[in-house]
Structure formats: C-alpha cells, structure tokens
Image: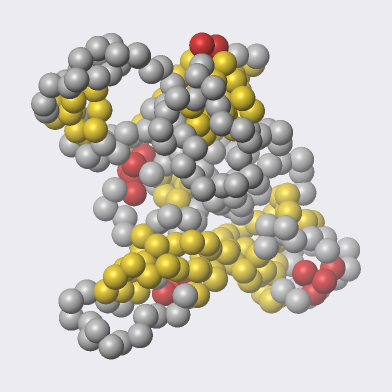
Amino acid sequence: KVEMGTPGLGPDLEFKIFREDIVVCPRDSSLLGVVEGVGGHSDSEEDGDNSQPVPLEMGQARVSWYKKLDNPQVEDTSELQVIDRALLHHDIVARSSDPLGQTGFISRVEVFCDVCYIKTGVVRRRVCSKTLIPVQPLKEGTYVTYGDWLGKVDRCLDHATVRFKDGSVCRVSNADPEQLVPADNEVFNQDCPYYPGVRVKGDSRLFRSARWLRGEYRSKNTEGTVVSVQPGRTEIRWVTASQTVDAEVQEPPEVVEGSRLRLLSAFAHTWWQMGDHGLLDPD
C-alpha cells in the first residue's frame, strides 16, 4: 500500500534497475540473482567494502547469482529483467513511469513467497510470508533486546545438531562454516549456513570435540545431516538502553548466547529474501 505525497521535481532519466532487485540472468532464464550495485546510483558504492572492484559505469549492474561461486558479476542493465523488488515500511517511492514525479511512502507491506521444498524440489507458489518460520532468526543487522538494552547483531554462530548414518547424534557448538562445510557441491548461504536436512562434513578433530547426544565418536563419522539448529555465540553492538537504566551502568557483554536474546520481530514477515531457509507453519 502506497500513500502518495508531494509532487516531485519533474521528468528525468528513468531508472529500471535498483540495488537489492531480484533479476533473471540473460544467459539462463532459470538463474536468479540479487543486484548489489548499479552504475549512476548514489547508494551503490557506499558499503565501505574496500574489496569492491572499480566503480560501475552507467548501464552496468553488479549482480550475485544464486548458488554461483564466481560472484559478483557485472551485467548490462538493459539485459536484466526485474522479477521482484523489496519495499519496506516508510520507503519513499515514485511511479516507474515518472521516477522524479509525485512521491509517496509505503504504509503496508504483504509478502508472498515461492517456496521450494528441499527434499522433493516441489515449488509452492504464493505462500504468505507470515506462515514461514526462520531457521535462524539472528542474522547480521537484526535488532535484539537483552534486558533493558537494544542492540544490533554483528555476527551469530549456530549450534548444529548432526545425525550420522549409524544413528549417532552429536551437537557442534558455535559451528564454524569453514570447518563444518557442505558435503555436497553446494554454496552456503552465509546468513543461514545450517538448516535441517543439509548434508555436512568435518574432520575428526571437529567431531571428536563435539558433544555426543546419542552414541559416541567414531573415526568413520565424518559426514552427516543437520537435524536442528539453535542460535549460539552472538556478537552484539549495543545501541541504547531504556530511560530506566542508570547512566553509570555498564553495557552488557559484546558476546551473548543467542538463546538469551529477544528478537525485535514486528516486521519480520517482510525480511524474507531469495535463498533464505525456513520452516512452513502447518497452521
């Protein structure tokens, strides 16, 4: 829902592609990607990442293609087709036919997702995002509370429970995606590397130091399947405290166990992005 506001500044260049747009690959219609930057857009090179390549020229876009290793890639914007655009509450918007004309702001957002079941590959269309449950809700950039303090997540590791072929089960605490890696040729989603059903592998040292919930460590157990995930070691940047907190009280520790944090989830149904893993609420 869009609430229209004041008139704009008049006609100008019409932009077709924006940062965070979901686009179709011109070389493979089944391949989707996320736009990371667009030439000529003021916000495309402001992420502070010194590893970014040279600035984009007008008519170019930097795109990361889903489940591809050689990302990002520079594409011609005229060859990209936008199939989805993320809009959040109070975003300022204008009609695509008159981008510098009358503006408005987003007052309500409803999100519907195409969900692909991991085991069967069956795609379920137009699933209301409010019925989806994130596997790991604590992602970089999300806001949380801890007592009277408000903070922003910088990084979160997972406690991954892994089951092996012989039925034994272990819990890998604060799993490192560089040590507990995908068993298949799959690219990890860095926001949610582990989810129920994903096959993983690790060396003997990793599993020997894990907590065994069923059975015991055996040297042959180097590959297994993740059966559950819980938030673990979470690095927090504290923003502010409620007015009831004494000014002399010290901030909470920068590292907190994820289970002790409360997620600010008022608009959580609008946070879903392509490639996220979630559980479908049967109700």
Image coordinates of residue 30 in percent, x first then y, are: 60, 19
Q: Is residue 63 left or right of residue 250?
A: right
Q: Going by the picture, which residue comes out furthest to the right?
A: 219
Which quarter of the picture shows residue 74? top right
Q: Classify 281 as above or below 137.
A: above
Q: Residue at coordinates 42% horizontally, 36% vertically from top-left?
A: 43
Residue 180 rendering spot, x and y as whole percentages: 72, 59
Instruction: Please say if 29 is above or below 165.
Output: above
Q: Position of residue 104 (x, y in %)?
A: 17, 28
The outermost residue toward the left is: 6
Residue at position x 73%, y 49% from top?
Answer: 182
Examine the rendering and report whether any part of residue 116 can be seen.
Answer: yes
* Colour style of the rendered protein structure: secondary structure
The quarter of the picture where residue 141 lies is bottom left
> Is 32 in front, or is 52?
52
Residue at 80% over, 74% down: 208
Q: Position of residue 281 (x, y in %)?
A: 40, 47
The answer to whether any part of residue 29 appears in the image is no
The residue at the point 44 percent across, 21 percent down is 17
Q: Is residue 51 above or below residue 39?
A: below
Question: How many numbered discs?
Answer: 0
Q: Quadrant of the N terminus?
A: top left
In-image side of 116 versus 125 (left or right): right
Instruction: From this view, report whether residue 208 is shown above or below residue 226.
Output: below
